[in-house]
Structures are given as structure tokens and as C-alpha cells.
Image: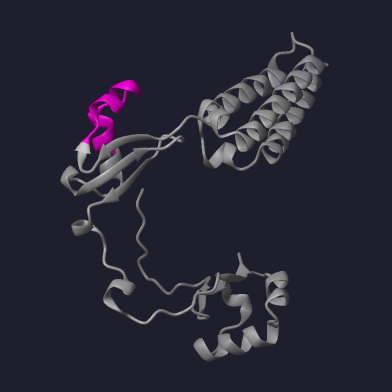
């Protein structure tokens, strides 16, 4: 009975962990603020106990998960409605570099070291701190950087190059399977796709295609099961 109970509890734990983020929102994963960090750790601990700690009643742990999820949800709503509460619940950004100067006092307040700052800048491809005009430590621990104008990339707009409208990419074949919904949604047909494939690669059929996408400029890109590469690179 113990093995059966653990099996049932483990499945229940996984189901709850998959369901709870849908209630709390995607920011629990993508934007890990103080609130989300505490929520994730606590939910993980409760779910682990639910799965394996048979000394605690499953009903108690499920109740704790429900109560904690409801509390976290209410805090999220409160943070959304009230700016002051949002700052207390999720934290607020901290300026690390302002007008090219390192803000030592701000870094001391949050116990952020120069080594951490240098590492964050290197991760963004910045090895010379003199290139930075502003750097801000966001709520989720990431550093946002505004480079000095002299070190910013030149855009098409800066160079006066004509700009064209872009569309969102549409995947037509995934893992060798035709994505019927995307074809219907954009008024496309299987016959049209087969015709376009024939123009690009004669002798090839849809069965040969591993991946196909209609790109941002309406261009069609096909990737085939047989790549024709004699010695593919492989890094172990």
C-alpha cells in the first residue's frame, strides 16, 4: 500500500505543479521576482512532501498548496493594482551605473559586487565599462544596459535604408507533420505547399520535409530529413 500511495501522491503532485503556474501566470517562470522566487521554492517544497512524505496526510498538503496558491495569486493581484505594494512584494529596479558613473552606494545597499557587475556586462558582450551609459539591476536579477551613443549599433533607420513590413513566422510542417490549423488560418492549402516545394527542390515531396516555415518576409524555408552533409559536425 505504501508504494501505491507514493505513486498516487507523486502523480497528484506533478498534476498540481503543472496546474498551479497556469493560475499564477507565466511570470512565475519567466520573470523571477522576490515574490515569484519565494512562491516557487515553497510550492516545490510542499509538492515534494506531498509526493514522498507519507508521514504527513496528503489532504493536509493539498490544502496547504491550495491556500498558498490562493495567497500568492491575491498578492499578484494586489501588486497589479497598487504600485507601492508592487514595490514591496516584487521589489524595484536599482540603478548601478548612471551617466557612465558607477553608483557605489546603490550597490552597497543591495550587496551587489563589482565582480557581479562585470560578469553581467560581459554576458551582454560588453567588456569595456566605459561603453555603458546606464545599467539597471531589474527585479528578476537581470541587468539592463543602455550603451553610450558612440557605441550603439547603427540601424536601418539611421542609414536611411527603406524598411519593409514584417509578418510573424508561420510554421507549416513540424517534425514531418503538416500543421493543418496554420494552413487553414492563413488561407493556404496542401496543394499550394506541394507546388512551392516543387519550385524550390524538384523531386522532393512533403514526406521528405522535416520542417517548413513561412518567414517574416513571406519566404518559404524547407529543411529536409536528408541534409546531404557528408561529415556533419558533432561536438561531444
Residue at the location (73% across, 27% down)? 70
- Count every numbered label the image shows and give the total: 0
Q: In the figure, 34 relative to 210: above or below?
A: above
Q: Quadrant of the N terminus?
A: top right
Q: In the figure, 62 relative to 230: above or below?
A: above
* Foreground of the two, 24 or 13: 24
Residue at the location (55% across, 70% down)? 169
Q: Residue 113 in the image: state x and y as whole percent.
A: 26, 26
- Tell me where the magenta segment starts and ends, as one range: 102-119
Q: Is residue 61 left or right of residue 86?
A: right
* Foreground of the two, 234 or 87: 87
What kind of colouring is applied to the model shown?
A: one colour
Q: Is residue 72 left or right of residue 119?
A: right
The majority secondary structure of the magenta stretch comes to: helix
Residue 77 lies within the magenta run: no
Q: Residue 17 in the image: state x and y as whole percent.
A: 69, 32
Q: Tell me the quarter of the picture where residue 198 sits.
A: bottom right
Q: Residue 191 in the image: state x and y as whole percent.
A: 69, 87
Residue 115 lies within the magenta run: yes
Q: Is residue 98 left or right of residue 209?
A: left
Q: Is residue 201 visible?
A: no
Q: Is residue 142 left or right of residue 1?
A: left
Q: Tell me the quarter of the picture where residue 154 sits.
A: bottom left
Q: Residue furthest top?
A: 55
Q: In the figure, 152 relative to 87: above or below?
A: below
Residue at the location (63% across, 83% down)? 193
Q: Tell me the quarter of the picture where residue 26 sits.
A: top right
Q: Residue 151 in the image: state x and y as whole percent.
A: 20, 57
Q: Is residue 230 visible?
A: yes
Amino acid at each position: 500500500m505504501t508504494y501505491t500511495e507514493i505513486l498516487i501522491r507523486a502523480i497528484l503532485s506533478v498534476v498540481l505543479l503543472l496546474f498551479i503556474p497556469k493560475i499564477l501566470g507565466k511570470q512565475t517562470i519567466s520573470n523571477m521576482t522576490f515574490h515569484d522566487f519565494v512562491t516557487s521554492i515553497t510550492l516545490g517544497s510542499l509538492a515534494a512532501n506531498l509526493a514522498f512524505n507519507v508521514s504527513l496526510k496528503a489532504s493536509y498538503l493539498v490544502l496547504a498548496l491550495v491556500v498558498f496558491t490562493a495567497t500568492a495569486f491575491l498578492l499578484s493581484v494586489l501588486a497589479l493594482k497598487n504600485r507601492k505594494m508592487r514595490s514591496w512584494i516584487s521589489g524595484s529596479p536599482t540603478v548601478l551605473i548612471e551617466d557612465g558613473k558607477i553608483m557605489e552606494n546603490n550597490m552597497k545597499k543591495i550587496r551587489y559586487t563589482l565582480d557581479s557587475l562585470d560578469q553581467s556586462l560581459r554576458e551582454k558582450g560588453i567588456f569595456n565599462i566605459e561603453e555603458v551609459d546606464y545599467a539597471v539591476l531589474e527585479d528578476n536579477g537581470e541587468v539592463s544596459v543602455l550603451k553610450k551613443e558612440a557605441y550603439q549599433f547603427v540601424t536601418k533607420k539611421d542609414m536611411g535604408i527603406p524598411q519593409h513590413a514584417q509578418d510573424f513566422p508561420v510554421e507549416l510542417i513540424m517534425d514531418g507533420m503538416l500543421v493543418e490549423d496554420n494552413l487553414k488560418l492563413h488561407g493556404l492549402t496542401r496543394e499550394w505547399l506541394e507546388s512551392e516545394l516543387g519550385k524550390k527542390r524538384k523531386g522532393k515531396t512533403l514526406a521528405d520535409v522535416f520542417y517548413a516555415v513561412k518567414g517574416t518576409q513571406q519566404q518559404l524555408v524547407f529543411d529536409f530529413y536528408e541534409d546531404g552533409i557528408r561529415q556533419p559536425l558533432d561536438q561531444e
